[in-house]
Amino acid sequence: MMTDLDLWSAAIAAAETRIAGRVLRTPLRRAGRLSARHDVPVYLKLENRQTTGAFKLRGATNALLSLDPASRARGVVTASTGNHGRALAHAARAEGIRCIVHISVLVPANKVAALEAEGADIRVTGDSQDEAEAAALALAETDGLTWIPPFDHAGVIAGQGTVGLEIVEDLPEAGSVLIPLSGGGLAAGVAAAIKARSPATRVIGISMERGAAMHASLLAGHPVSVREEATLADSLGGGIGLANRYTFSMARDLLDDVVLLTEDEIAVGIRAAAAEGETVEGAGAVGPGAILAGKVDLRDPVVAILSGSNIDPALHRNILASETV
Ligand SMILES: *Cc1c(COP(=O)(O)O)cnc(C)c1O
């Protein structure tokens, strides 16, 4: 009998074929300094170099290519803290599909500019991710557009899972994989891809202390909302949805651990990635940050997914120039 894990694994393999040629197959690079400093081999999965600057292009592309012709003709709508909206807009333009993006006022200016550059029809609605999402859902209903959410969607999860599939293909002996965790689309997909092929590999989700909705939900045993707070890892902000369908149970069943980082620990991660020659945003830095904070029980070799690079350049310069570590 096929288990859920087998079904997800098959969906991820199909996504890999579907999106090939439309997204980059990113390198898995050995991190010389981090490895030397920790005396364990550390590898970096370079999704910060993905087109649009984050892994989100994988899920967005897979979801769009899975639409039926009538839905495709009407177009799509989403709400996003930035990277999903940007990825969906990029993928929609590439496929000639209409795309509307709802965002909250919390989205940083550099991300709004990037969305505009991708040709998205942007609507700023609401003080939080949840309010932007409600507006997007209402529009989907009235205009017959297909709602493509940032994480809790089977096609999106399968697309993000291709990151995990590539990791197992390139480093089958991976002992631990560190996954930036927000709504859990990346973590669910990557964990499914890895656990289906390499059950002994530890998969660990990493969030920030400030407003970690998935962590709070896992503790409560059901989806809960948390207060949104400003954080260096702005791409990890937002709730998981109180009516969460997939990612909560997948995170609960497949992740071996979830750890939380302070703002300082995230900044250390940004500097560590820069020392390896990689520009990452706060969300993309939590893997190196967690290794250096000694917060994860590591089985080597370790893979850290550098999930994105979209950080305000002035903020990045300030963090690199500041003192500690
Ligand atoms: C969206 C995002 C995440 C978190 O992904 P989820 O699927 O919501 O858990 C991590 N890093 C970056 C750069 C992102 O854009």
Image (tube, rainbow, N blue to C red):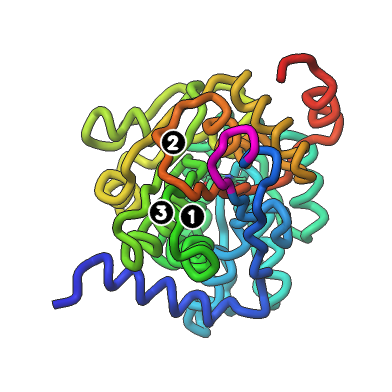
Q: Which residue is mark 1?
A: 149
State the image coordinates of residue 71 (x, y, percent, origin top left).
Answer: 51, 76
Residue kind at label 1, given as amino acid type? Pro
- Coordinates of residue 188 in the picture (x, y in percent): 39, 54
Q: Amino acid at mark 3?
A: Asp
Given contact means CB atoms under 8 Å apart, are the residues at marks 1 and 3 in contact? Answer: yes
Above or below — where is 62 with respect to 308?
Answer: below
Q: Quadrant of residue 274?
A: top right
Image location (x, y in percent) of residue 257: 34, 37
The residue identified by callout 2 is 239
Q: Residue at x 44, y 57 (%)?
A: 190
Disc 2 and disc 3 in contact, CB within 8 angstroms? no
Q: Residue furthest top?
A: 323
Q: Nearer the viewer, residue 145 or 234?
A: 234
Q: SS of the residue at dot 2? A: loop
User: Horizontally, is 21 left or right of 178 in the view?
Assistant: right
The residue identified by callout 3 is 152
Distance in Å between CA atoms under marks 2 and 3: 11 Å
Real-space CA distance between mark 1 and mark 3, rounded to the nearest whole angstrom: 6 Å
Could you tell me which secondary element the residue under label 3 belongs to? loop
Write the residue at 51% across / 82% down. 70
- Figure quadrant of the N terminus: bottom left
Q: Is residue 18 visible?
A: yes
Residue 268 on image: x %, y %? 66, 26
Instruction: Give the residue drawn at x 84%, y 35%.
Output: 313
Q: Which residues are magenta?
A: 36-42
Q: Nearer the viewer, residue 109 or 176?
A: 176
Hey, what amino acid is under mark 2?
Gly
